[in-house]
Amino acid sequence: MAIKIAIITSTRAEYGLLQPLIREMTEDSYFQAEVVVTGTHLLDKFGNTLEMIIADGIPVAHKIPIMGEEEESVSTIIGRGILAFSRLYEEQKYDAILVLGDRYELFSFCIPAMMLNIPIIHIHGGEKTEGAVDERIRHSITKMASLHFPTIQEYARRIIQMGESPEYVHPVGALGIDNIMAMQPLPREELEKELGIDFNNPVALVTFHPVTLDSADQIREQGEELFKALLAYDMHYIVTMPNNDSGSAILQNAIGHYVQKYPDRFIYRKSLGQKRYLSILSYVRMVIGNSSSGLIEVPSFRIPTINIGDRQRGRFAPATVIHCDCTYKDILDAIRKGDSLEFRESIADYDSPFGDGAAAKKMVRIIKKTDFHSERMLKKEFFDVDYQI
């Protein structure tokens, strides 16, 4: 009898990472894998990326709206989500749910699963992002989850340090590397025509999200400092929409202002989609912003990442990453360093530490060996690490 698992996706970025695992599980008769779509996927203002999932040929079992088009408090969204997912789980009787990452929506999925004794499979645990509320969310999900797939050994040790049994902690690499290894990039000419850009000129990809622990005034100032620095360097920029976090509207206003005022320097897209995003990385000079992608996927392309501010503070940073504060001078200095011949030559042969492109296959093998109805899975024991105080 097939094991019934809900694979839940709420954002374009996390869906892009989950895609190889979704394909592995939905095509394997061992699983009755149902894709549940929620969050910003169902919002027009974020590009209605549900259509992207459908276009990819991914079967969508359930659509669960938990957000409105107007900005709402995070607590309201989580509360609405808990009610909606409680009803879904009571109706569908899943053997387990599978989630990725650290966004606040995960509370909507994981709290009712925990209370209904449905085991949680969590991907990308054990990481540190001390500049964002995601840090606390991620570790909370780790304590709710029963099976863990961190990307590297360092993150696995941290999960075990939190009391999770090593038997259920498996560092398998990053799903984003699976996508890169399997991808045939879109032709350069096709992207140039679609975006209205010439990659013969220096181009950077920019993704800057709100720092959720900062105030509205701080986020507004950060947006201004970023765009002033971008304008000061002779480069063109493809800018993507920030996450739907507190402060997102402030950054969207800043983006809209500069895109409208300097259309010869900035190209804006709500959502590029996974293949288009990764294809663009094959042709740009660098990535600028504060997205986790700059530290995980981008290094595989051996191009610089300018990581701004403390949103990703504490996360493992490959040698391709240049950290800087969110000030005009620091951002500009970092861009200059990243675009220097010396730095580019220093990373020309860099190998990513995030796996060999087989993370999805490794996860499937481990999930198949897991008894989700065992007493150890449902009644977690705290694993004590020897430590002298």
Image: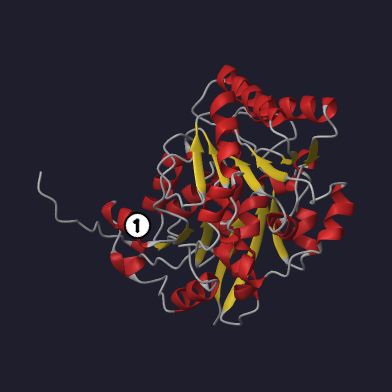
Q: Residue at x 57, y 46 (%)?
A: 305
Depth order, front residue of 268/189: 189
Q: Residue at x 58, y 68 (%)?
A: 178
Q: Is residue 9 visible?
A: no
The quadrant holding residue 366 is: bottom left
Depth order, front residue of 103/62: 103
Depth order, front residue of 342/209: 342
Residue 239 pos. (x, y %): 73, 40
Above or below 27: residue 335: above
Q: Residue at x 49, y 50 (%)?
A: 112
The quadrant holding residue 345 is: bottom right
Residue 83 pos. (x, y %): 58, 44
Above or below 17: residue 306: above
> Circle 1 — which element?
helix
| Horizontal relation, residue 215 to residue 287: left or right | left
The quadrant holding residue 88 is: bottom right
| Horizontal relation, residue 55 to residue 335: left or right | right
Q: How is the image coloured?
A: secondary structure
Quarter of the rendering occupied by the N terminus = bottom right
Above or below 85: residue 359: below
Quarter of the rendering occupied by the C terminus = top left
**Outermost residue toward the left in this view:** 388
**Outermost residue toward the top in this view:** 217
Above or below 213: residue 159: below
Q: What kind of residue is marked 1?
A: Glu
Residue 161 pos. (x, y %): 27, 53
Residue bearing the label numbered 1 = 154
| Horizontal relation, residue 316 to residue 256: left or right | left
